[in-house]
Image (cartoon, grey):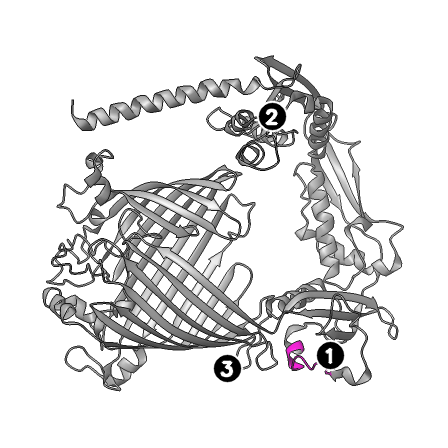
């Protein structure tokens, strides 16, 4: 028998023994129960109804089972590992130490049958069913005992569900009743739909929200009464909505805005709402009370949506509060409305604003590693001023430095050092020749940035990079975000190019593009859509699209044409290209603590006019910690190109290209406590648009799907609340650099071989999820 087969057989036997032991020990979960008590294993609900569709019956049973209390001990593959840990840890002698931690933090105490109230659960099920229109429902409860385990069983026998026959809205002479009646088309109560108490409550809230938009500040949903008549018809109800007789007069009155007071220096601890007359400034419709002259008054005009004489509405109320919060200068925002003492049916509005510290310093120390065997650290120091010109502008000055060391592999000794700085200024408004006013709850912003970075790759070369940009950032709503840089200029200049690197260029001319002077300028646009913040949705998505246009108008005006008529600016050829990238992600909720996450990336760049290739910094790469994890960072592709093995300690260059296709999917689930697990599959590659004689097989072709790399693996994620530490272990399943017909390498997997593990087992350590 071969060593490989012996290793597999031995591992198989070990797994069987461990699983058997786990099952035997798992069966002892009832051994530690209190005398005379039983282990509660959960409850089930059975609906007895011959009319209800099977699909609807199962859905209702699932809903009802979710109401049962208490919840049993959690199970994994039929076992209760947390209960097992609780029992094995035993009673700790003190409230510290490993045993206490295992028992009370990792473990879980047994859920006992003595904690279950069958009658209470039955009443909960009865009330829920009746609220869904199953009037006069019958519920019975029983239990089944087996081997010191007990399961609760509930039987629900509903009558035919009641249907809404008619809906009548208030029809009296009140102005607010007419407003309610006019909105009937948006009503959540539809004739023919089942009776549902939750829908009635939601309808009352809808009506309240509608009245709030019409000035009825003091109204609330409790002032609406839903009269339900089920006495006539065959399992039908008539619903009549009326305004209660005891509704206060002020709740039936529409209010306007009178005076508006702003306290920008309000203190939560001191009575800072009392000021001297000299501290009071009148600006348009606003009375500003401020001892420190904190802001220029025009900031309130852009932030507060109410004006004197406006009818109160909740939309402008919430928009104003959200915009104050989004300015980023206040730690606390409070708003009050009080009846005006000078005008009837009017409100005075008060805004109490507590400032964040104006200036602050943030220091970040980062430790990092990647699958290309680089390990390093980075230090960032940022100085910030939240109110630079008294208009809530954010000024940031930062310096940074870092080093990446490769202690092994082909690039050993080719360490990377970087040093640089950046200054940026962000205005909470659009700065443009045109008067553009945003009307969302999010403050539009204008941002200007200047950045310099020096990067040194020892024994190879150094690069000086300068960048400046000016653009706009705005959010339409919580789901849609835009970023437009109307000016984005990058200049890259090399120095200290070594003889060793020049020798490498002779072997691979593509390396020369890395040290070429580059001048890139043009607009960029980025759009993001996401609904992932809606946690209750089963399906959520994220989409990001990027458009990068460089030198397009300049190339057109100058008639630039590579290689016959290359145009220079300051003796540097400017880049001319179009680049598009899309990133689409889908998250499928499978359970309370599990989901299937998928991502698709498609990117393409096309150089023309003054350029024949994309700048190196703008090309696509693949592989690594957040990409195809079974291949080391930037070492995959392009296409089926085979990277020559390094000789004489030469470094392995990064591989980049014009086109990119990548797909990732992974199943994520909570294991216990802060530990989450995942299994994943990654696939993709990059390609050149045009053939390169120095990189055979790198060009895109009709058979590009045959050149997709595939990897798979598993990982653990440690959710520490303030960050997620991720470890992923991956192996290649398909290698496009191998000859066609030999690219699937599943049969070559051999965990018992140290040489195979060294070449194919890739450990990725990172912060945060890959997508």
Q: Please, is residue 410 above or below residue 547 in the view?
A: above
Label 1: few (<14), some or many (≥20) within 10 Å? many
Q: Marks 1 and 2, how far apart in space?
A: 59 Å
Q: Mark 3 points at which residue?
A: 432
Q: Mark 2 points at which residue?
A: 110
- Report the side of 273 relative to 325 (left or right): right
**In magenta segment, residue 763:** no
Q: Please, is residue 615 above or below residue 664 in the view?
A: below
Identify the image quadrant of residue 509.
Answer: bottom left
Q: What element carries label 2?
A: loop
Residue at (51, 73) in percent of width and height: 383
- Report the side of 768 relative to 322 (left or right): left
Tag in front: 1 or 3? 1
Identify the image quadrant of residue 95.
Answer: top right
**CB atoms at circles 1 and 2 under 8 Å apart?**
no
Residue at (26, 49) in percent of width and height: 631
Q: Name the residue under label 1.
A: 290
The magenta stretch spans which residues? 283-300
State the image coordinates of residue 472 (x, y, percent, origin top left): 48, 74
Q: Please, is residue 286 above or below residue 17 in the view?
A: below
């Amino acid at each position: 028998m071969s060593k490989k087969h012996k290793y597999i057989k031995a591992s198989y036997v070990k797994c069987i023994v461990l699983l058997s032991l786990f099952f035997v020990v798992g069966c002892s979960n009832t051994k530690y129960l209190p005398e005379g008590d039983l282990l509660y294993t959960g409850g089930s609900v059975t609906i007895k109804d011959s009319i209800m569709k099977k699909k609807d019956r199962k859905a209702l049973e699932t809903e009802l089972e979710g109401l049962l209390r208490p919840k049993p001990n959690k199970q994994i593959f039929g076992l209760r590992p947390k209960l097992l840990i609780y029992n094995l840890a035993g009673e700790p002698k003190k409230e510290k130490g490993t045993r206490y931690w295992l028992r009370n933090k990792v473990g879980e105490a047994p859920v006992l049958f003595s904690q279950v109230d069958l009658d209470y659960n039955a009443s909960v099920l009865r009330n829920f069913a009746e609220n869904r229109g199953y009037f006069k429902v019958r519920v019975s409860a029983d239990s089944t005992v087996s081997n010191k385990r007990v399961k609760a069983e509930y039987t629900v026998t509903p009558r035919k569900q009641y249907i809404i026959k008619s809906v009548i809205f208030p029809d009296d002479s009140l102005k607010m009743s007419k407003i309610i009646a006019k909105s009937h088309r948006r009503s959540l109560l539809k004739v023919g739909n089942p009776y549902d108490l939750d829908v009635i409550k939601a309808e009352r809230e809808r009506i309240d929200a509608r009245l709030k938009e019409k000035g009825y500040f003091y109204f609330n949903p409790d002032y609406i009464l839903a009269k339900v008549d089920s006495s006539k018809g065959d399992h039908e109800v008539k619903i009549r909505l009326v305004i209660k007789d005891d509704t206060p007069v002020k709740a039936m009155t529409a209010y306007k805005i009178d005076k508006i007071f702003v306290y920008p220096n309000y203190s939560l601890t001191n009575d800072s709402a009392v000021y001297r007359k000299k501290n009071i400034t009148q600006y348009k419709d606003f009375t500003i009370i401020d001892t420190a002259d904190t802001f220029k008054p025009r900031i309130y005009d852009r932030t507060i949506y109410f004006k004197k004489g406006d009818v109160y509405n909740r939309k402008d109320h919430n928009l104003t509060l959200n915009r104050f919060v989004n300015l980023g200068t206040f730690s606390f925002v409070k708003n009050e409305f009080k009846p005006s003492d000078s005008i009837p049916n009017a409100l005075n509005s008060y805004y109490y604003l507590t400032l964040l510290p104006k200036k602050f310093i943030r220091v970040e120390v980062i430790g990092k590693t990647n699958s290309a065997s680089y390990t390093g650290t980075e230090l960032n120091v940022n100085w910030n001023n939240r109110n630079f010109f008294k208009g809530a502008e954010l000024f940031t000055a930062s310096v940074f430095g870092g080093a990446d060391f490769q202690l092994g592999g082909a690039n050993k000794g080719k360490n990377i050092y970087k040093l640089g700085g950046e200054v940026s200024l962000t205005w909470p408004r659009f700065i443009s020749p045109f008067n553009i006013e945003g009307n969302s709850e999010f403050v539009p912003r204008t941002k200007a940035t200047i950045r310099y970075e020096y990067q040194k790759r020892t024994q190879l070369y150094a690069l000086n990079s300068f960048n400046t940009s000016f653009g706009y950032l705005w959010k339409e709503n919580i789901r849609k975000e835009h970023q437009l840089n109307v000016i984005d200029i990058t200049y890259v200049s090399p120095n200290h190019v070594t003889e060793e690197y020049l020798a490498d260029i002779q072997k691979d001319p593509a390396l020369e593009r890395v040290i070429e002077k580059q001048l890139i300028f043009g607009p960029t646009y980025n759009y993001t859509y996401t609904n992932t913040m809606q946690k209750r949705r089963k399906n959520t998505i994220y989409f990001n699209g990027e458009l990068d246009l460089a030198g397009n108008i300049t190339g057109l005006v100058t008639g630039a044409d590579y290689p016959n008529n290359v145009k220079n600016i300051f003796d540097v050829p400017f880049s001319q290209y179009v680049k598009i990238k899309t990133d689409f992600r889908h998250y499928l909720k499978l359970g309370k603590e599990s989901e299937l996450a998928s991502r698709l990336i498609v990117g393409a760049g096309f150089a023309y006019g003054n350029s024949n290739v994309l700048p190196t910094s703008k090309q696509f790469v693949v592989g690594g910690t957040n990409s195809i994890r079974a291949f080391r960072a930037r070492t995959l592709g392009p296409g089926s190109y085979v990277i020559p093995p390094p000789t004489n300690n030469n470094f392995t260059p990064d591989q980049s290209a014009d086109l990119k296709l990548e797909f990732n999917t992974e199943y994520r689930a909570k294991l216990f406590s802060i530990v989450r697990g995942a299994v994943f599959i990654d696939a993709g590659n990059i390609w050149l648009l045009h053939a390169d004689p120095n990189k055979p097989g790198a060009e895109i072709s009709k058979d590009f799907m045959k050149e997709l790399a595939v990897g798979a693996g598993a990982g653990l994620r440690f959710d520490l609340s303030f960050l997620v530490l991720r470890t992923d272990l991956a192996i290649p399943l398909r290698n496009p650099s191998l000859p066609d017909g030999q690219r699937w390498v599943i049969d070559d997997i051999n965990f018992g071989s140290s040489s195979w593990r060294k070449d194919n087992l890739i450990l990725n350590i990172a912060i945060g999820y890959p997508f």
